[in-house]
């Protein structure tokens, strides 16, 4: 097939990005991810590197602008939303350039699908790490939690699942670009591989007992970022809901509140401590909740364990969100947008891993709980560290109040579900306003709040505790390193071929 006309290629690239967005919440049409990538491959057919750069950027804008539209709601200005989308799209532009350059150099020797997959995943993994710690939102793997490709997350995490999505998309594109027996055979093989992946069901059985957990989604009195100004009222509401559960006879081993459930620190404010202690006393079991600790120069986002009138464990968020919780190079970025001053006090980085030893009377021992606060769920290395340190269950406390009625909450929930399978742990996401849910280690949702945001909800479930490591956690960063090494080898081969 000849190179598509430029207008058709542009339409295909933008359409591919828009199609891929449909694989993520709201819609969660997981099969649209391979379709969207296939449209990008078709647009890049026989493209020059310069053309590949532009088409990749257009695909990225078609994808990231709708995917990250919640940032417009959060900040209230369009410049940060567009800037974030442009920056993320630049990674897809890099992919487009490399894809075009390597395939044009004809060094793939019939392995075009594999090379394209390695390049895509390699760039995706760089985007997840740099700069400022990276931004993994929109990794293709996270679109697959409702499809058959979720199971392989336990074998290779986002690297393997994203690679399978890309290979499936490339096979679809080949049916149009290079029709024939080989293309049909490749499509059949990929269809069988995707379908067969649905048979990969990770073990979710208890290995160290069960823990009955109660999650409290207490809602906030007002909508949007201004909800933080109602901190005392929010904590009092959580107390009332928790006491109501106790009065109703709810039997549990642990109560978890979300991030920001007690943003006025009860460790330094006796009135808030009274609310927290009353709630914990009524429940009769340990209580975990989110709070903010301020120093003279900054603040820490912390998750605190509370029992018998005081804290017994604390975890400080290790990966604050750049431009959301702290502003790097504040003076420079203030020239671009005054929105940087919405973050008036920068959040500092915690130094300890996300594990909390929680005394559970019913088990007669401490249970090690792994914690990732809010956006930390997107960074697999943080949760992998928790599991390697003995976490038997994962808790993701989050505050979605500043994102309004957008898809941010359900996008984050999909990532939590993916992490449950990747790390082989029952996982609880508990939110201030929704969506909250509990997942087994095979990704099965066992209890979930309604998708209607800004609602009050509670859920109680007995969850299996597990201690074994998945293959993905055992491999650590080696899949990522292998992809980078192979991808760079093909880039080097293309450079050498061009010079000779």
Image: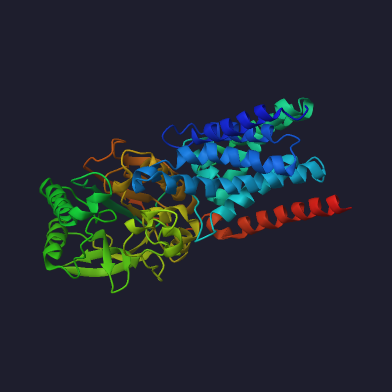
Q: Is residue 5 above or below residue 372?
A: above
The structure's colour scheme is rainbow
Q: Residue furthest bottom?
A: 296
Q: Position of residue 187 (x, y in %)?
A: 68, 30
Residue 101 visible to an observer of this rendering: yes
Q: Residue at coordinates 53% horizontally, 50% vertically from top-left?
A: 87
Q: Position of residue 367 (x, y in %)?
A: 33, 63
Residue 195 visible to an observer of this rendering: no
Q: Is residue 188 above or below residue 211?
A: above
Residue 359 placement, left or right of 85: left
Q: Position of residue 438 (x, y in %)?
A: 34, 46
Q: Is residue 356 above or below residue 442?
A: below
Q: Quadrant of residue 28?
A: top left
* Residue in front for this viewpoint, 324 or 133: 324
Residue 489 placement, left or right of 241: right
Q: Position of residue 400 (x, y in %)?
A: 32, 47
Residue 332 placement, left or right of 403: right
Q: Residue furthest front?
A: 335
* Residue in front for this viewpoint, 342 or 312: 342
* Residue in front for this viewpoint, 25 or 403: 403
Q: How many marks?
A: 0
Q: Quadrant of the N terminus?
A: top right
* Residue in front for this viewpoint, 58 or 127: 58
Q: Quadrant of residue 458?
A: top left
Q: Residue at coordinates 17% horizontally, 48% vertically from top-left?
A: 250
Q: Residue at coordinates 46% horizontally, 62% vertically from top-left?
A: 332
Q: Is residue 46 above or below residue 102?
A: above
Q: Residue at coordinates 41% horizontally, 48% vertically from top-left?
A: 416
């Amino acid at each position: 097939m000849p190179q598509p006309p430029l207008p058709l290629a542009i339409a295909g690239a933008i359409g591919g990005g828009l199609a891929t967005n449909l694989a993520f919440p709201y819609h969660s049409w997981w099969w649209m991810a391979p379709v969207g990538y296939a449209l990008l491959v078709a647009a890049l057919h026989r493209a020059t590197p310069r053309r590949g750069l532009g088409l990749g950027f257009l695909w990225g804008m078609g994808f990231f602008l709708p995917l990250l539209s919640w940032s417009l709601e959060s900040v209230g200005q369009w410049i940060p939303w567009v800037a974030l989308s442009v920056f993320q799209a630049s990674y897809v532009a890099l992919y487009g350039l490399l894809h075009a350059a390597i395939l044009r150099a004809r060094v793939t020797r019939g392995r075009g699908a594999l090379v394209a997959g390695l390049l895509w995943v390699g760039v995706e993994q760089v985007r997840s790490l740099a700069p400022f710690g990276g931004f993994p939102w929109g990794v293709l793997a996270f679109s697959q939690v409702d499809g058959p490709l979720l199971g392989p997350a336990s074998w290779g995490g986002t690297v393997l699942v994203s690679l399978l999505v890309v290979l499936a998309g490339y096979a679809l594109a080949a049916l149009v670009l290079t029709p024939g027996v080989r293309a049909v055979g490749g499509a059949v093989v990929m269809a069988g591989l995707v379908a067969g992946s649905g048979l990969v069901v990770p073990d979710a059985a208890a290995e160290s007992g069960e823990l009955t957990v109660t999650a409290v989604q207490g809602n906030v009195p007002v909508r949007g970022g201004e909800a933080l100004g109602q901190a005392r009222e929010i904590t009092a509401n959580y107390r009332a809901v928790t006491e109501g559960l106790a009065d109703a006879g709810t039997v549990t081993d642990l109560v978890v509140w979300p991030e920001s459930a007690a943003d006025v620190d009860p460790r330094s404010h006796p009135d808030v401590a009274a609310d927290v202690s009353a709630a914990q006393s009524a429940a009769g079991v340990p209580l975990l909740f989110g709070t903010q600790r301020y120093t003279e120069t900054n603040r820490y986002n912390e998750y605190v364990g509370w029992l018998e009138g005081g804290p017994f464990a604390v975890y400080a968020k290790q990966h604050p969100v750049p431009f959301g919780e702290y502003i790097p190079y504040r003076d420079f970025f203030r020239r671009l947008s005054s929105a940087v001053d919405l973050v008036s006090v920068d959040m500092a980085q915690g130094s300890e891993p996300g594990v909390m030893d929680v005394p559970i009377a019913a088990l007669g021992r401490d249970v090690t709980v792994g914690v990732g606060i809010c956006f930390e769920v997107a960074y697999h290395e943080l949760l992998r560290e928790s599991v390697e340190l003995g976490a038997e269950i994962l808790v993701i406390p989050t505050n979605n109040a500043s994102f309004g009625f957008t898809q941010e909450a359900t996008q984050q929930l999909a990532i939590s579900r993916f992490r449950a399978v990747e790390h082989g742990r029952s996982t609880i996401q508990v939110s201030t306003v929704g969506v909250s849910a509990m997942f087994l280690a095979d990704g099965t949702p066992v209890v979930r709040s309604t998708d209607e945001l800004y609602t009050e909800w509670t859920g109680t479930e007995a969850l299996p505790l597990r201690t074994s490591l998945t293959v993905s956690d055992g491999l650590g960063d080696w899949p990522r390193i292998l992809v980078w090494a192979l991808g760079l080898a093909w880039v080097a081969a293309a450079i050498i071929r061009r010079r000779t």
